[in-house]
Image (spheres, rainbow, N blue to C red):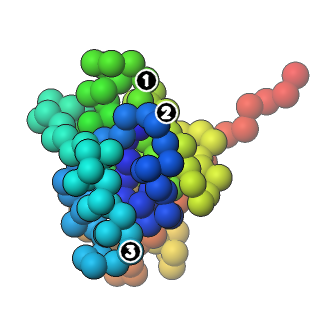
């Protein structure tokens, strides 16, 4: 199991599971220090119940490329990308890991990479989403990986939504 920050925030107890559990150091940075979640995280690390691992640069590059392709790159933190990269490495090395996360962007990229995931507090995604950015004022659409967050036409802050695909015609 590869544990994301949201697993700890949702109350996941690493001591209640017998499976091997791993995470990345950046996850700790996303947990508020001295909170109960942080105490649970530190206890799991210090006891050896959860192992800290660092993914390779190659795996991180593959995750970044996939995240850009589906439009989630700007919505993933460094910890999120490292969790995905670690899961990708484990998939290649030892089989089929599962990421424990409620983060839809992580789930979306994981699904595209063929990595299993399970959620704790949400239902999780059902299909891979490809995102676009759009202007809520003038409805102009932009690529999801656009750096600017303002509309070129009217200056309104852009939002994101899933790309709509035409419904298949019924016979």
Few, some or many residues within 10 Å of mark 1 (<14, 14–19, 20+):
some
Task: Examine the rendering and report whether any part of residue 122 can be seen.
Answer: yes
On screen, residue 59 versus residue 165, left or right, reads left
Q: Which residue lies furthest to the left in this view?
A: 57
The residue that disc 3 covers is 36
* Label at residue 35: none
Q: Which residue is drawn at 46% across and 37% down?
A: 18
Distance between mark 3 and mark 2 Cα atoms: 28 Å
Answer above or below: position of 99 versus 44. Answer: above
Few, some or many residues within 10 Å of mark 2 (<14, 14–19, 20+):
some
The residue that disc 2 covers is 116
Residue 121 location (% of width, % of height): 59, 60
Mark 3 or 1, nearer chain start: 3
Few, some or many residues within 10 Å of mark 3 (<14, 14–19, 20+):
some
Q: Tell whether label 2 touches label 1 (CB within 8 Å).
A: yes
Point out the frontmost of discs 3 and 1: 3
The residue that disc 1 covers is 96
Instruction: Indicate the secondary structure of the residue bearing disc 2.
Output: strand
Residue 105 location (% of width, % of height): 43, 52
């Amino acid at each position: 199991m590869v544990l994301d920050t949201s697993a700890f925030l949702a109350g996941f107890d690493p001591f209640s599971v017998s499976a091997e559990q791993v995470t990345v150091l950046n996850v700790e940075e996303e947990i508020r220090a001295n909170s109960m979640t942080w105490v649970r995280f530190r206890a799991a690390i210090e006891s050896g119940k959860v192992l800290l691992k660092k993914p390779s640069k190659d795996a991180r590059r593959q995750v970044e490329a996939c995240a850009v392709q589906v439009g989630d790159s700007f919505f993933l933190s460094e910890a999120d990308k490292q969790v995905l990269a670690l899961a990708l490495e484990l998939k290649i090395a030892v089989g089929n890991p599962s990421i424990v996360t409620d983060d839809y962007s992580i789930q979306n990229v994981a699904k595209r990479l063929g990595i299993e995931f399970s959620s704790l507090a949400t239902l999780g995604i059902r299909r891979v989403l490809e995102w676009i950015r759009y202007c809520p004022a003038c409805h102009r659409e932009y690529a999801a990986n656009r750096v600017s967050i303002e509309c070129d036409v009217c200056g309104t802050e852009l939002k994101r939504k899933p790309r709509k695909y035409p419904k298949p015609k019924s016979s």
